[in-house]
Image: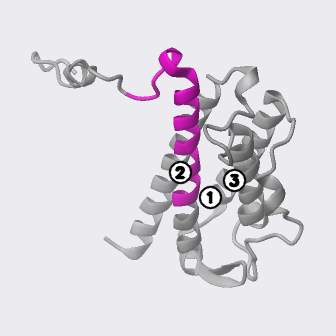
Amino acid sequence: MTAQRVADLYLSDVRGRMRGVRALGDGALAQLQASEWHTPLAQDGNSAAVLIQHLAGNMHSRWGALRGGYRAGTEGESAGRNRDAEFEEGALDGVTLMKLWDDGWQVFLDALDHLSPDDLTRPLTIRGETHTVLEAIQRQVAHYSGHVYQLILLVKTLRGPQWRTLSIARGGSAAYNAALWPPDGTA
């Protein structure tokens, strides 16, 4: 397999996986009650609102300059970003927070969609530290996934017994697997 083919496979995979991570976040956020957007699980913890503000701010900062494709000299920490403000609890409502969420993901996913396999080895900086585009993507895959799973835990805890699972329900693996591989081979 050629390096070009591996790079194509990587970009295809990361695009799909990050859309899946976003879908998990969407599924969790859809279960929040209006009164819960600004509810952290612990003192000094992050609410869903704060996590959304931070993710959106990071996505715009890191990927906004790459929405149309790779540009040499790109700095992934935009000068106008106020990261500390992203962690301040505000009074934004759910509709506004979902717009921030959608806009941030759109920036990130647009950037991924416009990257080519050749871009993966090109340099960009984040806070002055040089990364390859591949390293920057992997850094953000871990970062964004971590925060989305924080959202899931937060919402699952807030919803308690009303939580609707985003994957195979407990005790449901056998039925799920049976549907994939029925004994009669009709799948």
Region in magenta: 141-167
Locate the C terminus and report the quarter of the image it occupies: top left
Q: Counting other residues with Cα less than 10 Å from the Cα at mark 2, is it few (<14), some (14-19), or many (20 or more)?
A: some
Please tell me which residue lies in front, 50 or 17. Answer: 50
Q: Counting other residues with Cα less than 10 Å from the Cα at mark 3, is it few (<14), some (14-19), or many (20 or more)?
A: some
At which x and y percent is residue 184? 10, 15
Q: Amino acid at mark 1?
A: Leu
Residue at the (23%, 18%) spot, across then down? 175
Q: Quadrant of residue 27?
A: top right
Q: Which mark is residue 136?
A: none
Locate the N terminus and report the quarter of the image it occupies: bottom left
Q: Which mark is residue 145?
A: 2
- Vertical placement of residue 69 versus 60, above or below: below
Residue at the (75%, 21%) spot, across then down? 34
Classified by dominant secondary structure, the portion drawn in magenta counts as: helix
Q: Quadrant of residue 179?
A: top left
At which x and y percent is residue 141? 53, 58
Q: Which residue is mark 1?
A: 112
Q: Amino acid at mark 3?
A: Asp
* Circles 2 and 3 in contact, beta carbons < 8 Å: no
Between discs 2 and 3, the one toward the N terminus: 3
Q: Is residue 184 shown in magenta?
A: no
Please tell me which residue lies in front, 138 or 165. Answer: 165
Q: Amino acid at mark 2?
A: Ser
- Vertical placement of residue 14 versus 153, above or below: below
In the shown orientation, is residue 97 left or right of residue 115? right
* Circles 1 and 3 in contact, beta carbons < 8 Å: yes
Residue at the (76%, 53%) spot, across then down? 87
Q: Which residue is mark 3?
A: 110
At which x and y percent is residue 131? 59, 80
